[in-house]
Image (cartoon, grey):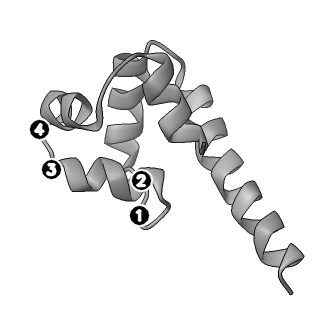
Amino acid sequence: MNGLARLRKQAELSQETVAAALKIDRSAVSKWETEVAFPSTKNISRLASLYGCTIDDVFDAIFEQEEIRSNIKEATQ
């Protein structure tokens, strides 16, 4: 499970709940969790508040996703 999805699930929230709280489409949350897109700085701050964690925790989750993706890419080459 990637970092952003892990934080969301630890907060016991659905993608729909996060999207409603941020007033965005649920597909945006899905894209963040699958690395198709990344949250804006404004939304990173809002995610931290919503998930009950720090902004650093959200950034760490994003970087964790990037590291996993990079490792997978290297392993398949």
Alpha carbon separation for disc pair 3 and 2: 12 Å
Q: Give the number of the disc on residue 37.
A: 1
Label 2 close to label 1 by CB (< 8 Å): yes
Amino acid type of the residue tagged 3 in the rendering: Asp
> Compared with residue 69, is residue 19 higher up or lower down, i.e. above or below?
above
Q: Which mark is residue 25?
A: 3
Q: Residue at x 47, y 58 (%)?
A: 34
Question: Residue at the spot x=43%, y=28% of the render?
Answer: 8
Q: Quadrant of residue 59?
A: top right
| Lower position in the chain sequence, tag 2 or tag 1 | 2
Which residue is under mark 4?
Answer: 23
Question: Mark 1 or mark 3, which has the lower sequence index?
Answer: 3
- Rendered position, 70 above or below 55: below
Q: Looking at numbered disc 2 in the image, what kind of residue is underneath it?
A: Trp
**Where is the C terminus found, in terms of image quarters?**
bottom right
Spatial separation of the CA atoms under disc 1 and disc 3 = 13 Å
Q: Nearer the viewer, residue 72 or 64?
A: 72
Circle 4/circle 1 CB separation < 8 Å:
no
Q: Amino acid at mark 4?
A: Lys
Secondary structure of the residue carrying numbered label 4: loop
Q: Position of residue 24 (x, y in %)?
A: 15, 45
User: Is residue 72 toward the left or the right of residue 44 in the image?
Assistant: right
Give the Cα separation between the discs numbered 4 and 1: 17 Å
Q: Earlier in the sequence, mark 2 or mark 4?
A: 4
